[in-house]
Image (spheres, helix red, strand yellow):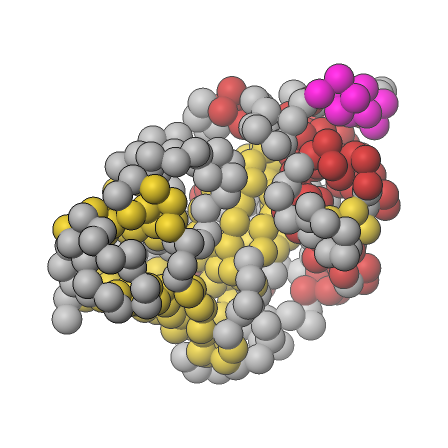
Amino acid sequence: MNKIVLGFIGIFGLFSFALANMLGFTNAGKERCAMPTARQLEFDYDVHLEKIPQGTTDLNAWLPLMPENDYQIVEETVIEPEDGYAITSDKTYGNKILHYALKSPQTPFHINVHYKVRRLEYSNQPQERQFITNRGRENLQEPNKYLQPSRLATISPRVKELASKLTKGKTDTIEKARAIYDYVFQNVSYDKTIPGWGNGDTERVCDLKAGNCTDFHSLFISLSRASNIPAKFVMGVPLTEEREGQPKGYHCWAEFYDEQLGWVPVDISEAWKDKSKYQYFFGNLNPNRLEFTQGRDIVLEPSQQGEPLNYFLYPYIETDGKPFYDFKVSFKFREQFEELGRR
């Protein structure tokens, strides 16, 4: 069994972790004291194909691979099966991709990616401007990429009009972004009872004022971009506070770019669920999540025959060039040892 080590514990990563523990922030800092500031985990991403169509000549499967950054340190990645795959990245966002290309595949087929990962609190809080990650300090590359609409995160005339109204009289990026954050928080409800939720359709959110995390953050991103604020969509897996679990779905959030601070994270849907953390989730993310990909309308590498993906967390599979959905995917995590940073 090959072990592919895709990440390492960097000096800055350790420094960031220590600094995050030492700093006491006002407002959000009170909320932070009750939270762990890091989690050390084993995480499994499993895919099972039980019924590949008989006579299939070519099967292509694309899975996202967990990235490494200052607040997500991937210590080890083990991939099985160890034959028939390549590691690529998409040309637009640089998302890491595990790609299997199989000839005359046999049923059943099982893919497992096992990680050992340390997830830190991600804090770039505008109110304090003390703790800025290395990622936050990066110069923004290709800013137009984060200012253009996507297929569903639109910048329609009504989005532009609303963005102009919300940011009128504000010249500072942080003030504008906070006005947009406040509007989405106050006007959108977390509601998965109305059909059409979860696609990140800005126009639907404008109409219904309801949806899940995808919908909350699509509206935030559309309004930010309409205000000339670069913004990005981030997709991952939520973690419960238990020591082990099997997450049943995804979670997403957003980041906007400030010229002084760099990338600043927001999680409006989590703030809506726990309104005591309303201040905290503007500029902070707790470690109860794992990041996998960024962006919308994703073209894989090698490119798929089907349409660009609305977002990329679950596997995308094609048999003989046609989308194939008869598979099962599951996630599982386990705490490796006592949570770090708990006070």
| Residue 190 found in image quarter | bottom right
Q: Please state which of residues 234 and 308 is positioned toward the viewer in this rendering.
A: 308
Magenta stretch: dominant secondary structure: helix
Left or right relative to 43: residue 303: left
Residue drawn at x 62%, y 43% is 199
- Left or right of 50? Residue 220 is right
Task: Tell me if residue 24 is in the magenta stretch.
Answer: no
Residue 314 in which image quadrant: bottom left
The quarter of the image holding the N terminus is: bottom left
Q: Quadrant of residue 20?
A: bottom right
Q: Position of residue 188 (x, y in %)?
A: 81, 45
Q: Position of residue 30 (x, y in %)?
A: 75, 64
- In this rendering, the answer to whether 183 lies above or below 97 is above
Look at the image and tell me whether residue 66 can be seen. yes
Q: Is residue 158 magenta?
A: yes
Q: Is residue 259 visible?
A: no
For the point 68% across and 64% down, the residue is: 32
- Residue under the point 34% across and 31% down: 91
Q: Position of residue 316 (x, y in %)?
A: 38, 49
Q: Is residue 317 left or right of residue 172?
A: left
Q: Is 241 placed left or right of 330 in the picture?
A: right
Image height check: is 292 above or below 240? above
Which residues make up the magenta segment? 156-166
